[in-house]
Image (spheres, grey):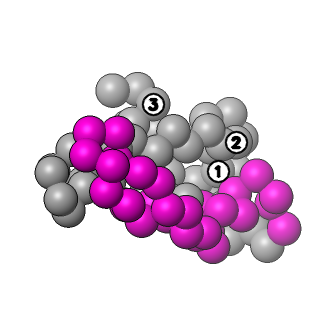
Amino acid sequence: MLDHCPGATNLRTPTLSIRKCPQCGNEVEVFSNDLKVTCDNCGFIIWNDIASCVQWCKYAKECVGEEMYRKLVERKEG
């Protein structure tokens, strides 16, 4: 894994943000590497729009790891 890629910092070392569910207003914890989170209150799916270098960097798979790379690429394609 590469050590100093600034574009993937929040994917390798997740940060937490609290967002409000657009459906019910409940507070939902979303980590920067979550693709989607389900609201515990109403079940609404909140998508995290992860825009990163993973889509174009040739070292992305090495940098973020196979599993995260696959999740991010599948999300953008599907």
Q: Secondary structure at mark 1?
A: helix
Q: Nearer the viewer, residue 62 or 6?
A: 6
Query: For residue 77, which quarter of the picture?
Result: top left
Residue found at x 76% / y 52%: 7
Q: Is residue 43 magenta?
A: no
Coordinates of residue 56 in the picture (x, y in percent): 68, 33
Which of disc 1 and disc 2 is earlier in sequence?
2
Q: Quadrant of the N terminus?
A: bottom right
The type of residue carrying mark 1 is Ala
Residue at mark 3: 76
Relative to 71, say whether 3 is above or below.
below
Q: Are marks 2 and 1 in contact (CB under 8 Å)?
A: yes
Residue range (magenta): 4-31
Residue at mark 2: 53
Which of disc 2 and disc 3 is earlier in sequence?
2
Nearer the observer, disc 3 or disc 1? 3
The type of residue carrying mark 2 is Cys
Coordinates of residue 47 in the picture (x, y in percent): 38, 41
Per the rendering, the mark at residue 60 is 1
Say few, some or many: other residues with alpha carbon within 10 Å of mark 3 (under 14 / 14 to 19 / 20 or more).
Answer: few
Locate residue 23 relative to residue 50 in the image: left or right.
Answer: left
**Mark-to-mark CA distance, 2 and 1:** 7 Å
Instruction: Give the residue at the far front of this rendering.
Output: 25
